Image: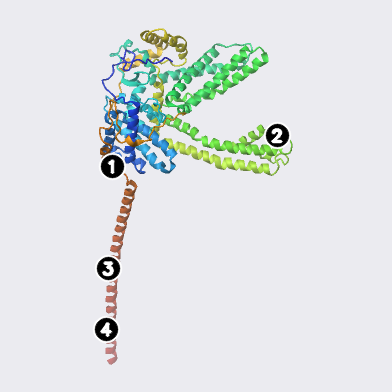
Amino acid sequence: MSKVPQNTVHPILDSEQGGGLLNVEICNPSPKTTLKLIQRLKALIMELIPDEVDIEQLKLPEVKNQVISPDTVSVFVDAGGDCRDAVPFCLLKLKEHFKSEALEDQSDYDEHICRSVACEALARYVVRRVDAERLPKLLSKRFSYVESDGDNSTPSSVLELAIDLHATFFLSSDEAQTAITSLWNGSWIQVHADKEQIEYLPYSKGAGHSLLSHFDPSRIGVPKYQNYLRIVIWLGFLAIYSLSVQSPTEQLNPEKTFDFWEVLLYGMSISFLLEEANKVFKSVRNQGMSSVFSFWTIINTVTYLLLTIAFTLRIAGIFSLNDTSSENLHMLSFEFLSLTSPLIWIKLLPIFDGFLWIGTMELVVIRMIRESFIFFLLLTVFFAGHAQALFALDAADGEQGSFTSICKMLLRSLFGDADFDTLSHHQRFGQPFGEIIFYVWNVVTILILMNVLVALYASSYEGVTDDAVNEFMAFFAGKTISMIRTPDQYVYIAPFNLIEGLFIAPLEYFVNKKTYRKINRWTLSILFFIPLSIIATLEANDHFTKTKFWKSLIDTRIPFDGEGDAFDPATEGEEYVISKHSFNALKSRLPDNSKTLEKSFDKSFKNLADELKTYYSLSEKIQEDIKRVETILAEKKEGGVKEDNRSKSSQGNSKNKKNKK
């Protein structure tokens, strides 16, 4: 790929980048100053979150948040002093630090996770307070700090760091999505200021509806157009691959050399391999080894590796002097070529991953594959133990059987085709020990490991779908930034990168930069004339609706040893001052969350006591009513007895009178 010019700090944009630079200054602290700011913000976080709090409470809006209130956000903004533009970056680095601390210190795991979430939430709310004019430069400014081993860290911007950390809550904010959407559709463009710095600038190319005024070779680097063009190229590659594998008898002819379709197939394969190797190399250099272990990187690596093996065997077969060997090599080459078919077809999924539902399902599948690692680890351990046991029992009688047949038998039982008849052979597997081992294998795999796999898949599905929108936004942000993150000023999409590597890139060392730029622009205009004409037509008719602004092998850890000056760090000889507000003054403005759990428990107990008092008062009232009713009934009963006595006495008197008569 072409190198980026390294001698201009603030480039004057020509027609290929669009409008001029905004007159907006962003602080540029030294790595040492950035480290001091990180240490100071960490001390504030420890004061803000001394104990575990409710994580969902931390993600509430500022006006409803009891922990991260608007005053709290102001404290962290003021804590940066002149370096307040670096506060979001430092907070995201602290998120990474506290997350690693949680894994190392399991006793305080919940507290560290709460602090990690708080750092991400604070970074989101701090960015929300940035003016619309400053937002592009703030999100693109790359900062660096001094690591524990004394080296400067790889410069990274807030947006890039959030993607690397998979900070879904930060990336789902309006500001981050404004930047991502603008970069995706080309409303913002990425300009290389120097070797390490980039800037996001609004694109203002051409007024009117003239096709020529909108014909710009640099527009081929816009992520949206890149994505569409790569899909068309891959569909063409799929068609060429299909034509190549449809005639195996011709390819197996020892006297046959490369035909037209094979030349196209292997030529495009080499270009894809070089593009992927360049991408992986720059990702490892800028982001570390962790960036390599992604789903699509692994798929691409395996695909291009199989194609390379097939190509190598094809070459060896053509130049082999032995006809039998040549035929065998051709057959083996065709077999490896056939193995790539599922991988080539699966790479069509990015056509539809721009839709929320399909993109979410793609995330679910990727997460399922990643989390099934523990299942395959357990399966491998159990498989090795049982296979070795059966092999030993088979060899105990002096006749050693095939170890491959034993492995196939165990694998077939895993898929529901258990062969119990073979294990019942008395002499071969030492009846009944062989059957016992085989039954144990089936019980462990079918009843235990399969249920573990189902539980892992269910957890993966729930983990993505419960926060599907934010997960999709983070995925889309990573896809967008990955297309422009590598420092290539002139984008040659494979297979056209072969032309760049063979004919264009060597000229950089023999011509001046102005001439080299003209050569690249003319070359891009010729190679991509059709897609550039379509882009110019669309942008000329639509006049380009603009997005609104406001809507590891070395110790790379942050050194927190000797934090005595972390509260009010001095920046001798520096242009920027951090401690414009004293640490104690900032601390006094923070809400007191030291008794968060105690306060919530006290509130719960108070509510319980109030409810008990209410029930007690109601029970007393009910008891009084019961006593009142009992009194009334007693009075009525007593009155009834008096009435009976009165009636009896009257009846007795009447009888006496009758007797006297």
Q: Nearer the viewer, mark 2 or mark 3?
A: 2
Q: Nearer the viewer, mark 3 or mark 4?
A: 3
Q: Earlier in the sequence, mark 2 or mark 3?
A: 2
Q: Which of marks 1 and 4 is nearer the N terminus?
A: 1
Looking at the rendered structure, the secondary structure element under dot 4 is helix
Crowdedness of circle 1 by 10 Å Cα count: few (<14), some, many (20+)? some
Crowdedness of circle 2 by 10 Å Cα count: few (<14), some, many (20+)? some
Labels 1 and 4 touching (C-beta < 8 A): no
In the picture, the quarter occupied by the N terminus is top left
Query: Label 1 to label 4, Cα distance in Å?
Result: 87 Å
Question: Number of numbered discs present?
Answer: 4
Query: Label 2 to label 3, Cα distance in Å?
Result: 95 Å
Crowdedness of circle 4 by 10 Å Cα count: few (<14), some, many (20+)? few
The residue beneath circle 3 is 628
The percent position of residue 303, horizontal first and vertical second, equals: 52, 22
Looking at the rendered structure, the secondary structure element under dot 2 is loop
Q: Earlier in the sequence, mark 4 or mark 2?
A: 2
